[in-house]
Image: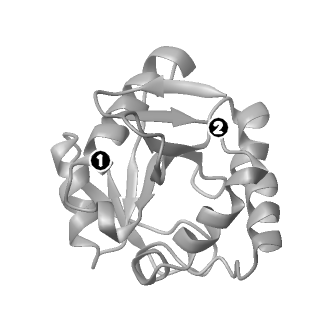
């Protein structure tokens, strides 16, 4: 299901048919180093990840992670969306892109569109960004979105604190 468009991108709900490219994205070294290893190693694992992750969030929360496609070609370049963090109660903007599409402004463009959509369509007043301290590229994206460092915050029991931008 189509959700929203930006100048160059189209964002839509995930389907299980996205499993092959999601498998690749979740196993990119930058994804594992900056976001975490989701232990998704097969197409079947990716289908399960999609069904129990993004696809289950749409009816539960009214939002979730979306597939990001180039409007010009329909090529999937990554994911972007809103995540409700159970541990913190915060809603944060999240994104991940294939390395060949980094540095092109897609993360900032999609995240700005998702934040605006979250405020208008979902009535969210506060949307934050969680980021690993070493992820300088993502910190720059959050700063371009107008977010500033607020504090170190854990996102799960026992996890190392990460940076919270708001």
Q: In this view, does 153 lie above or below 52?
A: below
Q: Which residue is drawn at 82% across and 63% down?
A: 48
On the image, which quarter does residue 18 sit in?
A: bottom right
Residue 12, position in %: x, y? 58, 34
Q: Mark 2 points at which residue?
A: 13
Q: Nearer the viewer, residue 3 or 159?
A: 3
Q: Is residue 150 above or below residue 64?
A: below
Residue 70, position in %: x, y? 39, 41
Q: Are marks 2 and 1 in contact (CB under 8 Å)?
A: no
Quadrant where the N terminus lies? top right
Q: In this view, does 73 lie above or below 119?
A: below
Q: Which residue is drawn at 28% across and 39% down?
A: 109
Residue 94, position in %: x, y? 46, 52
Q: Residue at x 43, y 60 (%)?
A: 96
Task: Label 2: state its secondary structure.
Answer: loop
Q: Which colour scheme is used?
A: one colour
Circle 2 Cα neighbour tier, 10 Å, few/some/many (<14 / 14–19 / ≥20): many
Q: Residue 106 carries which label?
A: 1
């Amino acid at each position: 299901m189509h959700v929203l468009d930006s100048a160059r991108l189209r964002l839509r709900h995930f389907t299980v048919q996205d499993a092959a490219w999601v498998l690749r994205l979740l196993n990119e070294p930058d994804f594992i180093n900056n976001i975490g290893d989701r232990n998704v190693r097969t197409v079947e694992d990716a289908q399960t990840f999609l069904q129990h992750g993004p696809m289950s969030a749409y009816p539960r929360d009214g939002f979730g992670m979306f597939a990001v496609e180039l409007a010009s070609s329909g090529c999937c370049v990554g994911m972007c969306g809103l995540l409700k963090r159970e541990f913190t109660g915060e809603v944060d903007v999240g994104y991940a892109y294939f390395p060949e599409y980094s540095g092109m402004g897609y993360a900032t463009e999609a995240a700005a569109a998702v934040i605006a959509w979250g405020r208008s369509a979902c009535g969210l007043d506060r949307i934050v960004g969680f980021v690993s301290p070493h992820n300088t590229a993502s910190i720059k994206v959050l700063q371009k979105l107008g977010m500033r460092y607020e504090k170190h915050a854990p996102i799960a029991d026992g996890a190392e604190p990460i940076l919270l931008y708001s």
